[in-house]
Image (cartoon, grey):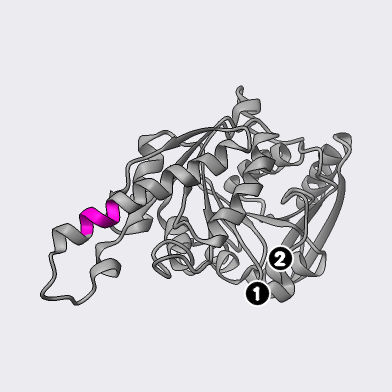
């Protein structure tokens, strides 16, 4: 039995914000939006954040307003091209005007303005301006956002992930906190995908800690809830450094996505430098971070 299911459960992720730097990684992520469309996502806002510090750098002797104007015009053209690619996935698309500012802050502010239900952001790539959006910016979004964040991860060509859906096998870092419980509602939502085959519950014990009877009972309730919906469940209980164990087990079990709450009691005490943030940094597969 899952807790706190909202009345609009079928509309949990109706609108998403998708920031892009027009890189190959950003384009690859469009295919993953198809997975969300099948679960009810209807509208995608595409955004490009312009970081003037990274565009201009220490320059002199150039017409800065002209450079900015040219870049904005080029960006608008690229946004329309990118929006057309998203439309081909059967989604309504809003190409937002390019916005100038520190990218992670711009992204989070825009998500609030358009009332997005979730931010979907690629985590690495080599776009026109390397690093302007992907990589460290995705980590900044995870830190600042008050919306859930789905961080898309792409392996290199030698280890490129070959899956039809990010929801095939979902690894869940669970610590019995209130936020972890709320996160389960999203995992349950994702597990409704026709492609979902398995959910892996991961709990990492504090040093010398043991699970009490109440905690064991709760894990059994969660298992039964997923099984009732036809989803296979495996529970893994380990001791060690939480983020390392979550990442290790996710990869060992060939998970296609990891889900984790941004903070909470137990081993998820802090976002900054905490388990969720480190999982986003270290994972090689997509990571869903529950925020509120």
Q: Secondary structure at mark 1?
A: loop
Residue that label 2 marks: 204
The main secondary structure of the magenta stretch is: helix
Residue 86 location in percent, x, y?
Answer: 56, 41
Q: Quadrant of residue 132?
A: bottom left
Task: Tell me the residue at 70%/37% (across/down).
Answer: 189
Residue 162 location in percent, x, y?
Answer: 77, 61
Give the quarter of the figure containing the N terminus. Answer: top right
* 69 drawn magenta: yes
171 to the left or right of 242: right
Q: Nearer the viewer, residue 141 or 47?
A: 47
Task: Tell me the residue at 73%/76% (across/down).
Answer: 158
Is 176 above or below relative to 246?
above
Residue 97 location in percent, x, y?
Answer: 32, 42
At label 1, counting other C-alpha atoms closer than 10 Å, the crowd grade (few under 14, some 14-19, many 20 or more) is: some
- 1 or 2: tag closer to the N-terminus: 2
Q: Is residue 195 visible?
A: yes
Q: CA distance from mark 1 to mark 2?
A: 8 Å
Q: Over which residues does the magenta segment extend?
A: 68-72
Is 209 above or below relative to 264?
below
Residue that label 1 marks: 241
Residue 247 location in percent, x, y?
Answer: 69, 68
Task: Tell me the residue at 30%/61% (across/down).
Answer: 51
Q: Nearer the viewer, residue 80 or 54?
A: 80
């Amino acid at each position: 039995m899952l807790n706190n299911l909202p009345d609009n459960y079928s509309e949990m992720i109706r609108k998403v914000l998708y920031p892009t730097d027009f890189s190959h990684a950003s384009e690859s992520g469009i295919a993953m939006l198809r997975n969300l469309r099948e679960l009810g996502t209807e509208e995608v806002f595409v955004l490009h954040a312009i970081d003037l510090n990274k565009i201009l750098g220490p320059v002199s002797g150039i017409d800065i307003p002209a450079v900015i104007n040219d870049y904005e015009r080029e960006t608008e053209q690229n946004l329309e091209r990118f929006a057309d690619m998203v439309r081909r996935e059967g989604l309504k698309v809003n190409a937002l005007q390019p916005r100038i500012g520190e990218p992670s802050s711009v992204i989070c502010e825009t998500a609030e303005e358009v009332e997005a239900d979730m931010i979907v952001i690629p985590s690495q790539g080599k776009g026109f301006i390397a690093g302007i959006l992907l990589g460290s910016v995705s980590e900044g979004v995870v830190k600042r956002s008050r919306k859930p964040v789905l961080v898309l991860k792409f392996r290199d060509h030698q280890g490129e992930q070959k899956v039809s859906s990010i929801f095939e096998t979902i690894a869940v870092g669970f610590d019995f906190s209130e936020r972890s419980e709320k996160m389960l509602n999203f995992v349950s939502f994702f597990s409704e995908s026709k492609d979902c085959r398995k959910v892996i519950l991961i709990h990492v014990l504090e040093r010398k800690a043991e699970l009490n009877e109440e905690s064991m009972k709760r894990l059994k309730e969660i298992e039964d809830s997923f099984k009732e919906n036809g989803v296979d469940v495996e529970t893994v209980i380990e001791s060690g450094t939480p983020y390392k164990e979550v990442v290790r087990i996710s990869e060992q079990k060939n998970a296609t996505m990891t889900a984790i709450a941004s903070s909470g009691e137990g081993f998820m005490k802090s976002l900054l430098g905490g388990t969720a943030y480190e999982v986003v940094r270290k994972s090689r597969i997509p990571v869903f971070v529950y925020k509120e």
